[in-house]
Amino acid sequence: MSHVEVVNFGCRLNIAEGEAIREAASGVTSDAPELIIINSCAVTAEAERQARQSIRRLKRARPDARIIVTGCAAETSASRFSQMAEVDAVVPNADKRNPMSFGLPFDGTNAIRPAVSGADHARAFVEVQNGCDHDCTFCVTTLARGASRSVPAGAVVDAVAQAVARGQQEVILTGVDLTSYGADLPGAPSLGHLVERILRLVPGLARLRLSSMDSIEIDDRLFALITGDTRVMPHVHLSLQSGDDMILKRMKRRHLRADAIRLVERLKAARPDIAIGADIIAGFPTEDDAMFANSLDLLDACDVVFGHIFPYSPRPGTAAARMPQLGRDVARARAEQLRAHVAARKAHWLSSLIGSEQQVLVELDGKSGHAENHARVEIISGRDFRYEPDALKGRIMTVTITASTGDTLLGEVR
């Protein structure tokens, strides 16, 4: 049993990187004190607060453990973490791919490879890109992760093939700026080229899903794959951030409200069952009531049923932190309004699926999973059907939807 524990915060990419660190450490045994690696997130002040809270709690519970902090907050708030009495060391984000950064022995066999998470789940998250070349005024990603870098397609295909070989039927491609994939590689292959290559070279992959994408960077090749290839899941999560053009300009986003609406209309026209998710920031500096109303309305205009809502918090070193601030209370109140609106939309959408049949990839608990449209489904026993969870683990099953809780579907295996 490894004496190394990795505690992840933040995005799917961070989780995938944490799994890569854990894998590299899995065979390490020694007489050294237990090591806890905090893989932090810096996207909001709340994310950093949660990491600090976790550090204090872990140290109280395991006073002899060594605690090392890495991740995005280790870049943006290195001094704050290094000054914590509970923290033994801070490892820069760029160095967390090297086992020796954590004091782990390195002989080449425990190299941290392209980050893949979910070895203990039915789905695998595969890192294909990291960093970002854009300069959104609210974001610390360029400070924390540096310039955009793409994983060569061959390494991605190998990682996907390995996931399939261990029985995982769905892979989710992840990145900080996923749709910028390939610009730094020879020949500048696009994300669409990568998706085509994966589908061609890993025929055993049943389901491919894409994580958050910049709407303005979805080109014709990628659009055709999302809408026309049944192995690409009908679920698109867009980095929209706001529904107001002036706020989008102050954020230095590269799209306008009409661009987002037009994309969703095209997606829905080509593949009506596509489910739309979106990232939205509430309470951005200078956002007045009318501007906020435009974001609220965008949820309807873009048919959003999965919302990732952030209350704005100023991040040191960003341009937005120097703009006139609305304050934490306003941002939180507006975030709650957005969340409530998305929740109502999601509940209505889930209700519309009652009576339908969904192809559900069952998680390893054998009791729940995700439909192709990303709706979470709990499997229940019907009057004439009882199931054994072990028989369903990791399988794609046809499930008849019988009810909805408002957040989750309930269904019986056919």
Image: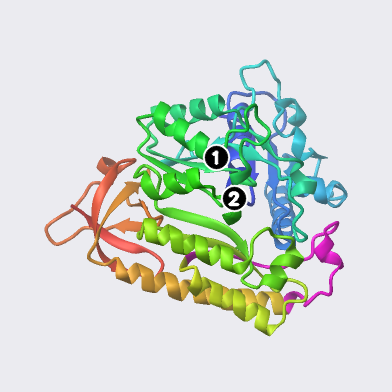
Is residue 383 left or right of 246 when viewed as pictured? left
Q: Is residue 195 above or below residue 374?
A: above
Residue to which mark 1 is pinned:
191
**Quarter holding residue 286:** bottom right
Residue 307 drawn in magenta: yes
Question: 29 or 79: which is nearer to us?
Answer: 79
Is residue 165 left or right of 182 when viewed as pictured? left
Residue at the image position 84 percent from the left and 74 percent from the top: 324
The x, y position of residue 91, in whole percent, is 79, 38
Three-letter code for the amino acid on which mark 1 is drawn: Leu
Give the magenta part as a residue range: 305-329
Residue 217 is marked as: 2
Three-letter code for the amino acid on which mark 2 is drawn: Glu
Residue 244 drawn in magenta: no
- Answer with mark 2 or mark 1, whichever residue precedes in sequence: 1
Q: Is residue 228 above or below residue 327?
A: above
The extreme top residue here reads 107
Q: Is residue 290 above or below residue 393?
A: below
